[in-house]
Amino acid sequence: MATIIDVPEEKILHVNNFEFTYAGSDVPNIKKLSMPIAKNCVTALIGPSGCGKTTLLRSFNRMHDLYPGNKYAGEVLFEGRNILDVKEDLITLRTKIGMIFQKPTAFPMSIFDNVAYGLRLQGMKNRSELNDRVEKSLKDAAIWNEVSTRLKQDANGLSGGQQQRLCIARAIAVEPEILLFDEPTSALDPISTQGIEILVSELKERVSIVIVTHNMQQAARVSDYTGFMYLGELIELGQTEELFVTPKEKLTEEYITGKFG
Amino acid sequence: MGIVIDKLFAFSTKIIALSILLIVAWIFTVLFQHSLDSINAFGFDFLVETKWAPNLEKFGALPAITGSVISTFLAMLLAVPIAIGVAIFLSEIAHHRLKAPVGVSIELLAAIPSVVYGMWGLFYFVPIVRDIFGGLGIGMLTAGIVLAIMILPFMAAVTRDAMNTTPDILKESAYALGATKWDVVKNIIIPYAKAGIIGSLILALGRAIGETMAVTFVMGNVHKISTDLSAPATSIPVTLANEFTEADTDLYFSSLFELSLILLVISFTIISIAKFYFLRRKRRL
Amino acid sequence: MNYRQKRIAINNIVMTLSTISALIGLSFLFWILGVLIFNGIEALNIGIFINEGAPPGYENSGLKQALIGQLLIVMYATAAGVPLGVLAGTYLSEYSQGSKLAEIIRDISDIMMSAPSIVIGAFVYAIVVIPMGHFSGYAGAIALAIIMIPIILRTTDDMLQLVPSTLREAAFALGAPKYKVIIQVVYRGARAGVLTGILLGIARVAGETAPLLFTSFNDNFLNTDMNEAMASLTVTMYNYATSPYEDWQRLGWAAAFILSMFILSLNIIGRLFLLQKRGK
């Protein structure tokens, strides 16, 4: 049924027969899904609303555990172990697998404190070390020039696009292995969106990226691999160019040509 | 014809809405007018005089005012930490199957008339205080505790509501950085909902200071300022509830009206601070 | 212990403390509820509903006068408070168009919602009891109505504003005058919410004691003349509970139980109304 290629690169995550069931649901919302996530690449997940792409993404850092009653099955292998294991230390896992959300989520604190937040959680107290890491992260997130003179100001004073880049700086400050992007530009204007997209392409040098997007052009622009999901199943995973130009599956073709969605 | 009715309907709704303001202004005016005898007789001394002796026609409000302040302060001291604990429990800890039933039962307990809390205090709590501290068991301490218990459901419910205004996505972002629940409460929820939480607590304070029935049973109505918290005392509402129907002279009545006016001004001020300073704008993500 | 373990330990401590405080709070509250139910049911019997008050030690004493008095006072208060509150709320939502005046009315009525009810009693004493020369059921009803109006006003205002403006526009487009649009379309759309507000308003004033102490006062015998002093469950409860007689205290618990159950039922019915509306 499904066409899922293997990736030549090293795999940072390996999803095996993964199933996910929301609390109160009788049937799995994601069914028997298997896919590799390539290291230092951008993998995009596309598909119509409700196909399970965000649900899958939020399984990779166990976000679903915040709400009781959700159930996982199968495997997601990371660093040689199944992170779905009940014994998995979620606090450490989440520092290694960061996340960027649909809307900018600047914390109610200063710009500096926002970026330093994850570092402080890990116990970093040394002022100069913190300064260095915050500056480096803000530079890497291409927002340093805009905020360097007002690091002590409330982060909520920044524009939406700036806030989202601040959130990216905050996420990369703790040097994660993987960054999960959940429709990161859905609340942004076209120019801010372009800025985030450029950033995503640059960041993959250092971190593996999985991005969920409702925007097929975005997937085509930023990703190396694209997975198309439909009704809780992965229909096709391929190199982005191939998937958009010569899809192997009829459903994929119908979706990318706009027959439904 | 239709136009006439239309105009009439619009006009009458407006008059009625305006009459709300009128009633409030009227309340202040009437209380002030009836306080005039006492204001003329005692002036500012009314507020600092400690003697309240109806038989001598001598009235000083200090014991009642102090009693109101101390009993409310005690109640806040006990209720605030527990209410915040309950609110954290309801918003972050409780299993989702527990959240709704516990939350609803707390809201329903807030609806139970305060006179019931007062009765419980008199029959079940006074004996305990008597056993521990000796004396009569009625007084400031008992009143403070019963008031704390009475105000707790309201306080916990509004504090939880304030905490719940924190967007899930903001909390998730902190969890996604490896935060613990306490990290999220301390660094995200409390800073985000600070104004709402403080406003809710002050609103509860405004209610507590005017609360009559929960304390009337257990205060004792003794116009004496004592350093002993377990001794009988009084507060403004307690004095009003006990003496309004017993007052026999114009000056006595007038003094009670002045007490009412003082109470109204105090609670109006506290509630206004809560409403206008803290609960005015809702922040949005 | 490294920093991470310390954080987790602190987290566990604080979360345990929160859970304990929730347990402490709940246990006190359920203690009170338990006392209320236990004493109430024990004191309840049919005589309470058919007998009037009697001197202590007298066998056939009941709460008939307080039940009927309470009902009358709350009914009169509702009859005055509901239309006034609903119409004032209608002005704020439908006519004021965000004017400064409307904002002031909203703020003041919000403050009145939390103002000390005993002060309202003193006010009504001054404007009704003194001129009339005696306590009366009317005075009690007026005090309760004054407390009720801000509650009804606020919920009506909120609930009418939830009615989508397209619904109003559709009715206007059919050529209906504004008052008809409001009465026939807006009120209907907001019915469940406004009704809930009214039920909660009644529940709130039904439990008030302080404003009745020196307005409707009390009467140990049945009286249905609103122009005379009148018994209520709350004031009766207060008088009986503070009396030294055990049989009166028992009647006090019975009154507390009956009143609390009435108020809790109103609250639950109000919630069900809202749930039902949301379910649609």
Image (cartoon, rainbow, N blue to C red):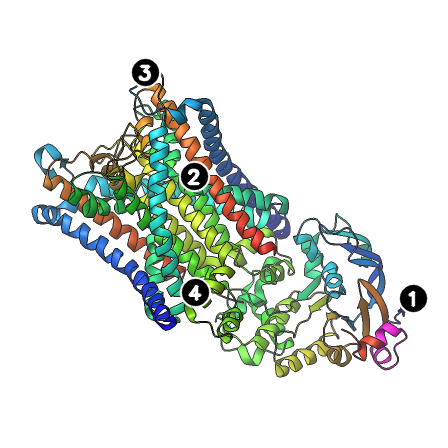
For residue A1, the mark is 1
Q: Is residue A226 above or below residue C124?
A: below
Three-letter code for the amino acid on which mark 4 is drawn: Arg
Specify the quadrant of the image occupied by residue A44: bottom right
Give the distance between the C-alpha atoms of the residues marked 4 and 1, in whole angstroms: 54 Å
The CA span between labels 4 and 3 is: 59 Å
* SS under mark 2: loop
User: Residue sitting at 58 percent across and 78 percent down?
Assistant: A144
Q: Amino acid at mark 1?
A: Met
Calculate the distance from the C-alpha at mark 4 to the C-alpha at mark 2: 30 Å
Residue wearing tag 3: C57
Q: Are marks 2 and 3 in contact (CB under 8 Å)?
A: no
The boundaries of the magenta stretch are A238-253
**Type of residue at label 2?**
Ile
Mark seen at residue B112 = 2
Work out whether residue A133 or residue B163 is closer to the camera in this orientation and state it. B163
Residue denoted by label 4: B281
**Amino acid type for the residue under numbered disc 3:** Gly
Q: Examine the structure image and report whether residue A250 is included in the region drawn in magenta.
A: yes
Residue A237 lies in what quarter of the image? bottom right
Query: Disc 3 sits on a residue from what chain?
Result: C
